[in-house]
Image: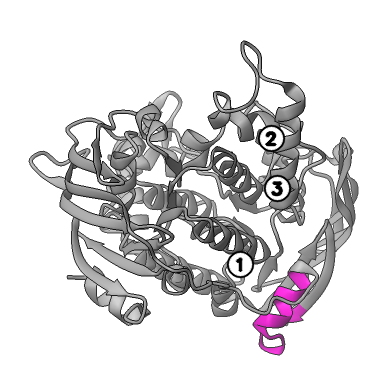
Amino acid sequence: MSESILEMRNVTKTFPGVKALSNVNLDLKKGEILGICGENGAGKSTLMKVLSGSFSANQYEGDILINGKEVRFDSVATAQSYGIEMVYQEINMLMMCTVAENIFINNIPGEGKFVDFKKLFKDTQELLDYAGLTDIYPKEIAHNLNSGQMAMVSLLRAYAKNPKVLVLDEPTGALTNNEVDILMRILNELRDKGVSCIYISHKLEEIYRICDRVMVMRDGEVVGTHLINEVREDELIEEMIGRKVVNLYPKESVEIGEEVFRVEDIVVPHPTIKNRNIVDHVSFKLYKGEILGIGGLVGAGRSEILGAIFGQIKKGVSKKVFVKGREVTINSPADAMEVGIGFVTEERKQNGIIWMLSIKDNIVLASLNDLPGKVFVDNKVEESRAQELYDQLHIKAPSINTKVVSLSGGNQQKVVISKWLLKKPDILLIDEPTRGIDVGAKAEIYKLMNELTQSGISIIMVSSDMPELVNMSDRCLVISNGRITGELSKEEISDTAVMKAAIM
């Protein structure tokens, strides 16, 4: 491997009440892809914010060296001037601007106030052609893109700046398999050109697929750095969580009971294509204590099924819903909660949490009418219930009074799940239960799902994580083009069977 292009030495970063980084050292070789793994709260994103200039030099301790020379970053622009580009986990787009304007936002061709739109759109089309993104157009308004397309545009924006160091933070969370393949191809080509990359991911299969070395972080410290071909996956997991995990998918056998939920003939109009349904006359049943998995490709209509059931999606929706044999009307989330249905949404930041409230306030939010108290809720009861779930789910934060906005994505997801655990619904809809959650926390979430089903709660789980879908489902429905194209028993569920039905 060639010389180091980037070094970070003894980097320490402290927030009020917590040391996020403690004497972290990192070195990156020219033309290398360095993976970084660790649980949520391990310090990965904080370290990258130091590197990208999001924290100015006086906000942390330690040194950064580029090609052996010490540098000081006072802003993101300063870091970019040294060739460091970061693609963040959270999409950052100018929603009312075109794809072309988003890609070349700081380098739009033209003179003075005049934009050379012909060159702008031509250069953008060349980039899209290079990437093989045939479903994105230069003049398309960013607001019309799905999350995966936005992620690819963010990648091309960084690529267009010819970076020397490219940092990717959980880049594939919203991508289709084809988009992941495109990303991997681009990264391999950048490596061949001598560009260095830092690749942060919970998905160890991606780390093994693309990285040359991997650095493991835990509790703000580096606990190991390895050549990727010299370390086993189970060794990485043990370093990440500080203990052995015997079974990543601890699905326990539960006696399946009587029917508790049934939906008939659910229809959801496509949000952008006229005279087309994204959910097209779907019907199914759910039984007591069952985990009913729903699989399929992105855009098949899986999330829309859950949103329509919960009353979150309303426009043009038609359906018949039966809870414990009784037909019920659900026109809003309040209606759904009234009949014992909860919803852990995929879009936690839009629908799952209230950013500026504390962990405690978010956990009790759905249960305010159920807690003791007449006019005013008893604060001691709130704190006690929230603290129990905070401890049970191992939420990493200074206290239950910490604002949710300061938490990592995985810990935010734990808060959303805690909210519904306190509510104790009979039926729980979960959309991508472990997206953005580290491997140790995944096992904890699965354990909680087992406990819920053993207590008689029934779960409908949408998942794009194939091992999760295969191992945690008692039964699996596969959706393709808005319709059920497969229903698989526990014994029939496999990667092959799901994918075969998904492409029908």
Determine whether the residue tagged by mark 1 lies in a helix, strand or loop.
loop
Which residue does the numbered mark 2 point to in the structure image? Answer: 359
Quarter holding residue 234? bottom right
Inter-mark Cα distance, 2 to 3: 28 Å
Residue 232 magenta-highlighted: yes
Name the residue located 47 percent from the left edge and 69 percent from the top edge. 254
Name the residue located 62 percent from the left edge and 31 percent from the top edge. 364
Identify residue type, mark 1: Val
- Determine if residue 6 is in view: no
**First to last magenta residue range:** 226-240
Determine whether the residue tagged by mark 2 lies in a helix, strand or loop.
helix
Q: Is the N terminus in the top left, top right, bottom left or bottom right quadrant?
A: bottom right
Inter-mark Cα distance, 2 to 1: 41 Å
Q: Which mark is residue 195?
A: 1
Q: Is residue 120 above or below residue 482?
A: above
Quarter holding residue 15? top right
State the residue in front, 45 or 365: 365
* Colour mode of the rendering: one colour
Mark toward the start of the polypeptide (3 vs 1): 3
Dots 2 and 3: beta carbons under 8 Å?
Answer: no
Dots 2 and 1: beta carbons under 8 Å?
Answer: no
Inter-mark Cα distance, 3 to 1: 16 Å
Which is the main secondary structure of the residues drawn in magenta?
A: helix
Which residue does the numbered mark 3 point to in the structure image? Answer: 52
Of the two numbered discs 2 and 3 in the rendering, the one whose residue sits closer to the viewer = 2
Q: Residues within 10 Å of mark 1 (few under 14, many from 20)?
A: many
Mark toward the start of the polypeptide (2 vs 1): 1
Q: In x, y percent, where is residue 154?
A: 48, 49
Q: In x, y percent, where is residue 284?
A: 23, 56
Q: Which mark is residue 218?
A: none
Q: Residue furthest left?
A: 275
Q: In x, y percent, where is residue 304?
A: 29, 45
